Amino acid sequence: MILYNEADIGLDEPQTVPGDTSEPQPVQYDPVAKTEAGGCGPYSIPEAAPPPYPQFSFSLALNFLKEGGSVARVGWNGKGLRVSAQFPTINSWMTLPYLYIEYPDGRRWPWLASQTDIMSDDWHHF
């Protein structure tokens, strides 16, 4: 596993983890990407294939939510999570619209977008 891109720091050969016999993989700079181990870092291994659905920004996701749709992010660790909007009715306890996240088992919880969520372009229809 390559720890960092040697061209960026002026080294002649890739730096590797001692004892690692795997072939070096191409590395690309992406400050918000997930690393192979699941953490965040500036260098990550690119995805093997693009997702089979279109991706878009949070502003488009928010418009889709306002129209009654559900959205999710490719970058989320949890699979099957989705965000939807709840609009109050005459019988609602809440008086203003809000966003909630729904877990795969059907549980729902009010949701606030993080700065990373807002700046990401990996939103898709759910």
Image (spheres, helix red, strand yellow):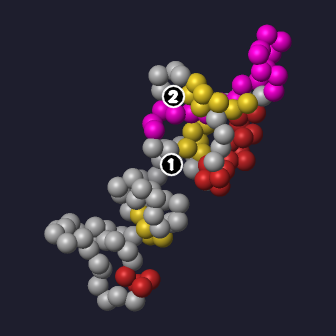
Q: Secondary structure at mark 1?
A: loop
Check residue 103 in the rendering and tell me which mark sits there, or answer none.
2
* Residue at image coords 38%, 74%: 4
**Left or right, residue 51 beside residue 93:** left
Q: Which residues are magenta?
A: 78-96
In the rendered view, tell whether residue 31 sits above or below residue 37. below
Q: Is residue 30 left or right of residue 113?
A: left
Mark 1: amino acid: Gly
Q: Residues within 10 Å of mark 1 (few under 14, many from 20)?
A: some
Q: Which residue was labeled with disc 1?
A: 75
| Amino acid type shown at disc 2 | Tyr
Quadrant of the image for the N terminus? bottom left
The answer to whether residue 84 is magenta is yes
Q: Quadrant of residue 94?
A: top right
From the viewer's perspective, tell me whether residue 9 is left or right of residue 25. right
Please check the rendered image and state whether residue 77 is part of the magenta-colored stretch, yes or no.
no
Give whichever of 70, 118 is nearer the camera: 118
Any part of residue 70 in sight: no
Question: Quick one: label 2 or label 1, which is nearer the N terminus?
Answer: 1
Most extreme residue toward the front, as rendered?
93
- Label 2 sits on a secondary structure element that is loop
Residue 38 spot, x, y in % from top left: 39, 53
Residue 80's spot in the image, x, y percent?
Answer: 48, 32
